[in-house]
Image (spheres, grey):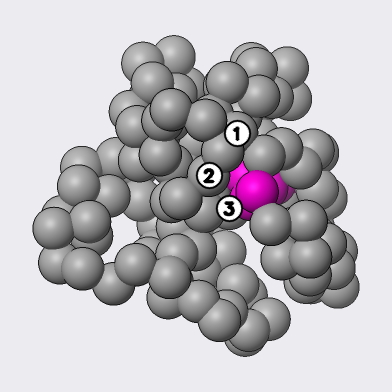
Amino acid sequence: MVKKILIVEDDMILSMVNKHYVETLGHQVVQSVRNGLDAIAAVKKHNPDIILMDIRIEGEMDGIDVMEQIQLFSPVKVIYLTGNSEPATKQRAEKTNMLDFCIKPVSIDDIKSAIEKKA
């Protein structure tokens, strides 16, 4: 089944790579955004099935803060993609609708297995 996926990543190259991975796996990227406010607006607009969320993004909120806000109005699941493997960060992330917590660099196989966790 095709999933609608929102990408939240402030690194343009990584955003394009993630979009390529998602589309290669047969899913639809509804939008790619760089910051929390745009992510919140995109969830309201597109109602995605999954968010690929970097934790360190542009703006005042990090990716976990953004998910805490999104959870207030949407049951969307999140796959975190991060360079930060600190246990405290993962513990914060686990309090959101987390499907997976992937440490960068992330491969297409990492994305595939994380998306399939929802099935």
Measured in 3D between alpha carbons, the distance from the residue under mark 3 to the one under mark 2, in whole angstroms, is 12 Å
Q: Earlier in the sequence, mark 1 or mark 3?
A: 1
Residue on which the image places disc 3: 52
Give the structural element (helix, strand or loop) at label 1.
Answer: loop
Q: Which mark is residue 35?
A: 1
Residue 13, percent from left and from top: 79, 65
Residue 45, percent from left and from top: 73, 17
Which residue occupies the foreground of this view, 85 or 109?
A: 85
The magenta stretch is: 4-10
Question: Residue flagged by tag 3: what amino acid is it?
Answer: Leu
**Looking at the image, which residue is at 71% across and 37% down?**
33
Q: Earlier in the sequence, mark 1 or mark 2?
A: 1
Task: Identify the main secondary structure in magenta.
Answer: strand
Residue on which the image places disc 2: 57
Question: Residue flagged by tag 2: what amino acid is it?
Answer: Ile
Residue 94 makes an appearance in the image: no
**Looking at the image, which residue is at 34% across and 32% down?**
65
Label 1 or label 3, whichever lies nearer to me, is 1
Q: Is residue 96 left or right of residue 57?
A: left
